[in-house]
Image (cartoon, rainbow, N blue to C red):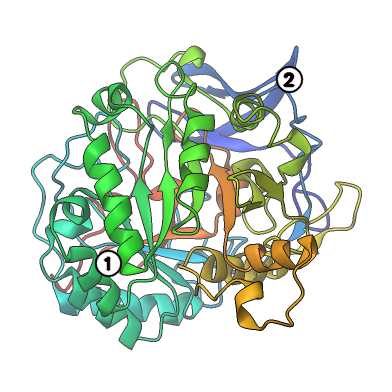
Amino acid sequence: MSPGGGESAAAEPRSVCPVCLRPIPARHETLAGETFLVKACPEHGEFRTVVWRGEPDFYAWARPKIPSPPRHPFTRASRGCPLDCGLCDAHRQHTCTALIEVTWRCDLGCPVCFASSGKVAPPDPSPAAVARLLDRVVEASGRCNLQLSGGEPTVRDDLPDLIRLAKSRGFPFVQLNTNGLRIGREPGYARTLAEAGLDSVFLQFDGTGDPVYARLRGRPLLPVKLAALDALAEAGIGIVLVPTVAPGVNDHDLGAIIRLAAARSPAVRGVHFQPVSYFGRYPEAPDDAARITLPEIMRALVEQTGGAMRLNHFTPPGCEHSHCSFHANYVVGEDGALHRLGEGGGCGCTPGSASRPARPASEGADKSKAFVKRQWVAPALDPAPEKLSPMAPRDDLDRFLARAATHTLAVSAMAFQDCWTLDLERLRGCCIHEVSPDGRLIPFCAYNLTSMSGETLYRGRCDDPEA
């Protein structure tokens, strides 16, 4: 770590052994524009995995930050990261988004799944157990942004009650992580969720053609996904499309996803790409050809949108570690064209050049949370300026500003880490925290971490003591 406590290209990252999950030394090596995480376990040998390909440059993308530790750590750092999660008192970023899994059941059995859903699932946590977890989030981090997840949360018939429960606890932004099947198939269900207070939906949306869903989800799903979009738009719930990006499967379709999102603006508020990560049982390390990195997604978006999106539009985050994500913000014109929103009209997360002094991570976190609450909810659609008054200005700037008040589209991506790519420097700066059944808050990538044999550090090992 640098003396100021921020990210540093000179700092030696650490990782874990993919076989035994033992913390081990690691380093980054860059050859011919490709950056690898290289690590060696004294028992199981060396591992080498690509984590960044091409421009923007890996080291130039880094941004220094002054840590913003949890308000109330629940555990003490003793064995070293990632073995003390809770959050521990050595964690370097407080919670921006807390994620509560309200069920481990699912109505899909996707080959790609963080939670290995679709297998035999334990009973759902009771409403009282969910209430305890909400209270733990408030105790640890205050009323941050909240995501209800699973499994597939909509298999719970009392999901509207859980949304009302979260709102009654004072959480200002409640989002649902869902595959959208029930929303697309059950008339009126989206309206029920909206009436319960749901602000936004993180909708699994991998592509614009059914071959993509057949590969990633095991069945054709596009018609029901489109029906879910219609239902959510009609109910006034903000929509974020969430594609899992796998090379050779849907990496050719990223521009089409952006065009679909723009065509459905302002109901669709954003697209949040997630490069495929490898969780579960993998006796052999995934080939580097099976991975796609953040800069490759950026360049694909530039190419597939015909230059409407440009490489210099994308910026590092101001909250989580810089190598975890990117973002860009646009206004969708009346003709569907994308017009970039600069720093003044975006999320305010852009920390500036790498040469600038380290900024407090709390500053970026506050701006990020405020942006999410503002951007990812459905906008209030006011009349066009020319309809407000016969004397209202009607020039291009007025029309653009009116459009920017409603028809904005946030484009982002987040690279989740698996046992081959896990960088403990990134993990210590994580701001997305799973609330385990026993009430600990655990960084997302640590909670979902599995060894090559499928063994976990936390998932399935954090039993609710009051269950």
* Percent x, y of residue 441: 41, 64
Q: Earlier along the polypeptide chain: callout 2 or callout 1?
A: 2
Quadrant including the C terminus: bottom left
SS at mark 2 in the image: strand
Three-letter code, disc 2: Thr
Circle 1 SS class? loop
Depth order, front residue of 308/214:
308
Q: Which residue is mark 1?
A: 438
Q: In this figure, which residue is indicated by the disc labeled 2?
A: 30
How many residues crowd mark 1 within 10 Å: few (<14), some (14–19), many (20+)?
some
- In the image, is 280 to the left or to the right of 335? left
Residue 224 x/y as whole percent: 22, 43
Q: Is residue 284 left or right of residue 58?
A: left
Amino acid at pointer 1:
Asp
Q: Residues within 10 Å of mark 2 (few under 14, many from 20)?
A: some
**Residue at horizontal 60 percent and vertical 46 percent from the top:** 335
Q: Residue at x 70, y 64 (%)?
A: 399
Is 322 drawn above or below residue 287 in the view shown? below
